[in-house]
Amino acid sequence: MKTKFVIGITIIIGAVIIFFLSGGVKGAKVFYMTPDEFINAKFNGGERVRLTGRIETGSVKVSSENQELNFVLEDDKAKINIHYSGNVPESFAEGVDIIVDGRMGEGVFEARDIIVKCPSKYESRLKEKKKVSQ
Amino acid sequence: MNNFGNFSLYFAHALCLWGIVVSYLASRKKDLRALKSAERSLISIFILNFISVVALIWAFVRDDFTIKYVFEYSRRAQPLIYKITALWGGMEGSLLFWEFLLSFYGVIAVYFFRKKIYHLLPFTSLVIFFVQGFFLFLLSFKTNPFAPLVDSDENAVNTDISQLIDGNGLNPLLQNFYMAVHPPLLYLGFVGFTIPFALIISAFFEREKDRAYLTPLRYFSLSSWLFLGMGIIFGSYWAYLELGWGGYWGWDPVENASLIPFLTATAFLHTLILEKKKGIFKRFNYILITATFILSIYGTYLTRSGVLQSVHSFGSEGSNIPFYFHIGNIFLAFMASVIILSLIVAATRKNMFKSKGVIESAFSKETMILYGTILLSVFAFIVFYGVTSPIFYKIFSGKELYNGEEFYNLRTVPVSIAILFVMSLAASLPWGKEKIKDLRKGLYISSISGGLFSVSGFFYLFSNSVWCEKLLNERLIFIYFILIFFFCGFLLSSIFISYLKGVRLFKNKGFFLSLFMPFRKEPSRYGGLIVHSGVIIFCAGVAFSSVFQEKYDEILKEGESFRAGGVVFHLSKLSSDDLSEDISKVNELKIWAEVDIFENEKYKGTLIPMRVHYRSTIENNEPPSYEVAIKSTIFKDLYMILGGFDLIEKRATLTLYINPFVAFLWLGGLIILIGGIFVFIPPKREIQ
C-alpha cells in the first residue's frame, strides 16, 4: 500500500510539473528579436517581445512634461518606431545598443521597459554582449 | 614568482594523475602504502595550489601587468583590498580559487575520515582527484591565470613596457564589501558538495554496510549548504545595494545558477534525516546529492563558459580551436562523465538502495518530508528549465527565448505556497505511527493562531488604500496573501509549541537553563525549527516587498520637494567633487544629492544618492555608476537613486522606491543561517 501511495504522489507531482512547463498557465513565451526579424515575423500586436537594436541617431524625441519618449530602433535592415512613457534611462543615448521590452501597438511599438545596460554581474559579460552586436 | 605559480599548477596536475592511480590501488588492493601516497598527494596539491594563489595575489599587489589577467581586472589606483579580491573577478582566477578551495576540502576530508571511515578514503579521494584533475586541466591548458599579456602582434609584453601601462581595473560594481565576500562564500558552498558526492559514491562502490558514513556526509553537506545560503543572501543584498533597480532578485541566470543546487541540497538534508533515522529514502539521497554536485558544476559552466552571455557566442571561441577544446564542451564532457560514473556505480550496486523501513503513516513527518522534497525538486526543476530552455531553443529553432521574472513567478509562487503548507503540517505532525490524537490540542491551537493571523492580516492589507486597490484587481495574489498569513500563524505557533514541549523536559534544570537545553540536547531538531521560522518570515518579506513595491520618478530643483507614501522629500543640495580633476590620480569622482525626509512634519534623516565616475566609466564614455541611498526601517525601506543631474541648473531626477517589509527578508535570511549553525552543532551525547 505504501509503495502505491508513493507512486501515486509521484504521478500527481509529475502531472503538475508538465502542466506548469507546457504553458498550462497563462503567459506566452517571450523571444528576443532584431527589428528585421520582428517585421518579417508579421506580428499583428499582442505578443510580447524583446527587441534588440540600436537607437537611430537623430530620432529621439522627449516631451519634457510627462516624460514621453519617442525614438526609432534600428538594425542594419529595418527600423521600428518606439514609444515609451516614464523616466528616460540615464545611459540612454543615440547610437547606443538597447533592449526594448513591450508589444506592438497601433503603428508604434509600445515599450514597457528599456534596458540599456545588460544587468549582468560580471564585466566580461558586457564585453561579450558588445562584441556580438558589432 | 609568476613562473613559480604557473609551474605549481602543472605540477599539481601531474600529482592528480598520480593520485588517481594510487587511490585506485589503495581501494582495490587495500594497499596501505598507496593510501598514504594518495593522502600525501592531496596535501601536496593543496600546498601547490596555495602557492599559485599567493603568486597571483602577489602579482596583483605588485601591479604586474605582464600578466593578462592582472591587466584585465586591476589598475594601479585600485584600493589594496580590491586588488586582492580581483583574484575572483574573472573566470581564470575564479577557477583557480575554486580549485584551491577544493584542495582545501580534500585535506579536511583526509583528517575527518581518519577517525571512523578510513576505509572509505581511497575511493573518495579518487573522486576528488578526478574533479581536481578536471579543474587543473582547465587551469593548465585552457584558462591559465598566468597567461602573459600580448600586444596586437601576439608578442608578450615585457616588463619595461608593463611598467608604463595601467590595467583596465575591476568592474566598479564589484568594488563593494558584499561583493568581495559573496564569491568566496558561494564557491565554498559549490565546491563543498564535491566531498559528500565523493563520499556517497565511495560508500556505494565499497558496498558499505555500516551507516557511520552518514554523519560526515551530513556535516559536509550542511556546511556547504550554509556557505551557499550565505553566499546567496549576501549576493542579493549586494544586488539590492549596488544595482539600483530597487530589487534584490532578478531571476538572472547567474543568480539562478546558485539557487538550483541550493534547493536540491535543501531537499537532500531533509531526506538524509530519514535515512539516518529509519534507513529509508536511500535512492532519493543518492540522486539528490549527485544532482547537487552536478548542478553546482553546471552553475559554473553556465556563468563561466560563455554559453549564456549571449547565445550567439556559443562555440565562437575562434575557428583555430578544435571543437572538443572549447571550454563549454570540456565542461559538458566532464559533467557527462560524472553522470556516467554515478549511473554505473548505482547500477552495479542496486542492493545498496534497499530500504530498511517503510513510511508507516500518511499523516506523519516522514510523509511531509517526502512531499517537501518533491516540491523542492519541482522548484529546482522549474529554475533549471528556465535557465536551460533558451539554450535549446537557440540550437533547435534559432530563436532567442527570454525567461524573465514573469516566467518564474508564475510557476514558483504556487510551488512555494505548497511548500509552506507542507512545512506547516510537518511542524505539527508526529513521527511514525504515533497517534495523531495526542497532538490534537496542538493542532487546534495552531489553527486558531493561523486563523487569527489571516483575519488581522486581512484588515492590515485593507487599511492601506494602495494595497487594497491592487489586491482587488488581482484576486489570486489576495488569496496567496491570506494563505501566507495563515501559514505564518500556524507554523510559528506549532514551532513555539514544539519548543515549549522541549523546554518542559528540562524543567528540573531551572528556568534559564531549560530555555537553552533543547538546543544543547537536540541541536539539529530545534535548530531546524529556527530555520523553518526564518523561512516563513523570509517568505512574508518577499511577498510584501515584491507585490507592494511603489515607484516614483520626480524631477526637482534645489529647494523643491515632493510627497510620496505620506513622506515628504526635500532636495536641499546637489553637489559634486571637482570633476575636472585627473581621474588617473584618484579612484573615483562623486556627484550627490542631499534629500531630507520629513514624516508628519518631523525631520527623519537625509538620503544621499550618488553617481560615481571611475576611470573605466570615463574612458569608455559611460555614464557614472549609481550609488543607492537607503533609509531602512522594519516596516519599509526608502530607496533612492539619483537618475539625471544638471549641476549648473541645480536640477536632479530622483527615482524613489518604497519597499515594504524588505527588512523581514534579511531578518528571515539571518534566522535561517543562525538556525543552520545550530543544526551544525554536534549534540551533547556525540561529544562524550
Image (cartoon, helix red, strand yellow):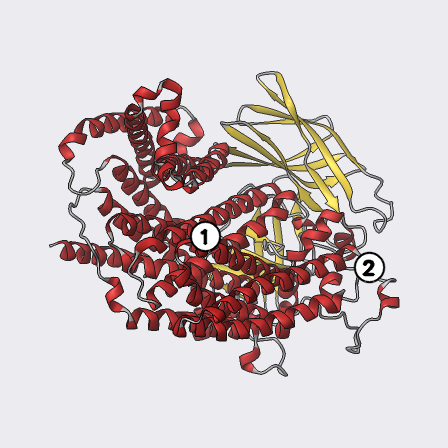
Residue that lies at the very extreme toward the top in this rendered image: B601
Task: Look at the numbered disc 1 and give the secondary structure of its residue.
Answer: helix
At label 1, the amino acid type is Leu
Q: CA distance from mark 1 to mark 2?
A: 37 Å
Which residue in the protein does label 1 denote?
A: B259
Question: Is residue B175 or residue A53 the one in the foreground?
Answer: B175
Residue A39 in sight from this viewpoint: no
Question: Is residue A100 or residue B58 the one in the foreground?
Answer: B58
State which quarter of the image contains the C terminus of chain B.
top left
Q: Is residue B554 left or right of residue B676?
A: right
Q: Position of residue B66 (x, y in %)?
A: 79, 67
Question: Is residue B29 or residue B553 the one in the foreground?
Answer: B29
Sequence-first tag of 1 and 2: 2
Q: Position of residue B192 (x, y in %)?
A: 49, 55
Question: Is residue B440 or residue A65 the one in the foreground?
Answer: B440
Q: In the image, is residue B203 above or below residue B137?
A: above
